[in-house]
Amino acid sequence: RIWLSIRKGMSQKRNVHNHHCTRHRVKHSTFGSSCVGAWAIFLAMGVFVHPCWVPRIFGKLVRHASRASLHAVDGSVLRFAAFADGATGGNPAGVAIRNSMPPEVDMYRVAAEVGFSETVFAVPQTGGWRVRYFSPETEVEFCGHATIALGAALAMRHGDGVFDLQLNSANVTVEGRRDGASFAGALQSPPTGSHPADPTFVQRSLNLFGYTQQDLDSRIPPSIVEGGNKHLVLALSSRASLAAMKYDLDAGRDLMREASLVTIILVHTAESQQFHVRNPFASGGVYEDPATGSAAAAFAGYLRDLGWPHGGRIEITQGEDMGMRSRLMVTMTEKRGSSVRVEGTARLME
């Protein structure tokens, strides 16, 4: 009798069911079986629902779930690890490609929900893409690893190519390439520059990390460097000192924001063209970045300004002490202040 009652209720609502099932690509027989299962669940929960109403209730649930699914697709965020070391390492970045730029409050919210050091938002415009970068706490003018991630995402959607990007205060390009499941990218940075850092601020920065003047490598003096963002370079003479880096996040945030720094670049020279780097990113609420493309560009420009024997190319290993080993390759010309090329691989995260 129960089964006949259910079938009668389903027959009375057949036209409604057919409309819903066609819309959601669900066969009527599957929908009917699901209604029976849903009615059984209601009874198990101690909730009595007349069998005739089960199809209507279940249909509403299906429509709601379908709309939620469509919303997730339209508002999806791709996740790439940029400057990866093969199948591991790299710095995770969110990539949100939209038809129009969302309100700032929404971009901050998405960046916080993604939880990576940066999420890049990109919208198409005539001749290229309008791009903005958000950490969970701040908007940044330029982000290298998120740019590499964007290049990988654009290559995935539009094929290999060089894409023009309009930032808030600069124009750059990113090249994206795909080889099966692997991606590679290369960015041309904004112009680079450097000038000596204020000695008092340098001492305060050393105090933040518990370093002294004796820990510094005199060949690379402390300096403020730029390549889309502003950074402080502190070169350490010992790899062990770099590995031992620690600091208070709140104190670091206050110090970096006071000087409008995005990160502090802590670097140890392994060879003239090979460097080990750590990048505290307290200004954005992130203790440390596993790979920082904008800092790599700024540091390479500074080496050029110093007359360092870079041979036109340097390799940076970063994130090793975090267990997220990353590799960044930087090539440059001898023209002081000119853009540099930062490249690396990217892997799509599950």
Image (cartoon, grey):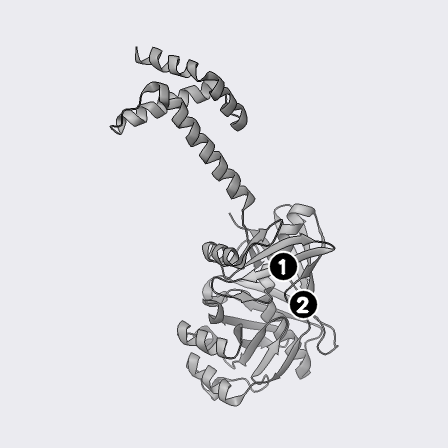
As shown in the figure, which amino acid type bears the numbered disc 2? Ala
Q: Is residue 179 visible?
A: no
Q: Crowding near pointer 1: few (<14 within 10 Å), some, many (20+)?
A: many
Location of residue 127 by image quarter = bottom right
Q: Is residue 326 above or below residue 27?
A: below
For this view, does 182 lie left or right of residue 23? right
- Residue at the spot x=68%, y=81% of the render? 305
At label 1, the amino acid type is: Val
> Which residue lies at the image location 49% right of the left edge and 34% below the top edge?
66
Q: Residue visible at 56% across and 87% down?
A: 218
Q: Secondary structure at mark 1?
A: strand
The percent position of residue 40, horizontal first and vertical second, equals 31, 23
Q: Position of residue 74 (x, y in %)?
A: 56, 43
Q: Is residue 145 visible?
A: yes
Residue that badge 1 annotates: 131
Picture coordinates of residue 346, whole percent (x, y): 59, 55
For label 2, count other residues whose C-alpha is less than 10 Å away and answer few (under 14), some (14-19) or many (20+): few
Whether residue 10 sits left or right of residue 344 in the image: it is left
Find residue 39 and report its image quarter. top left
Disc 1 to disc 2, C-alpha distance? 10 Å
121 vs 56: above or below: below
The secondary structure type at the circle numbered 2 is: loop
Give how far across and how far down residue 140 sits, in percent. 56, 66
| Above or below: residue 304 compared with residue 103 | below
User: Left or right of 42: which side holds 216?
Assistant: right
How many dots with numbers? 2
Mark 2 lies on residue: 170
* Image quadrant containing the N terminus: top left
Dot label at residue 114? none
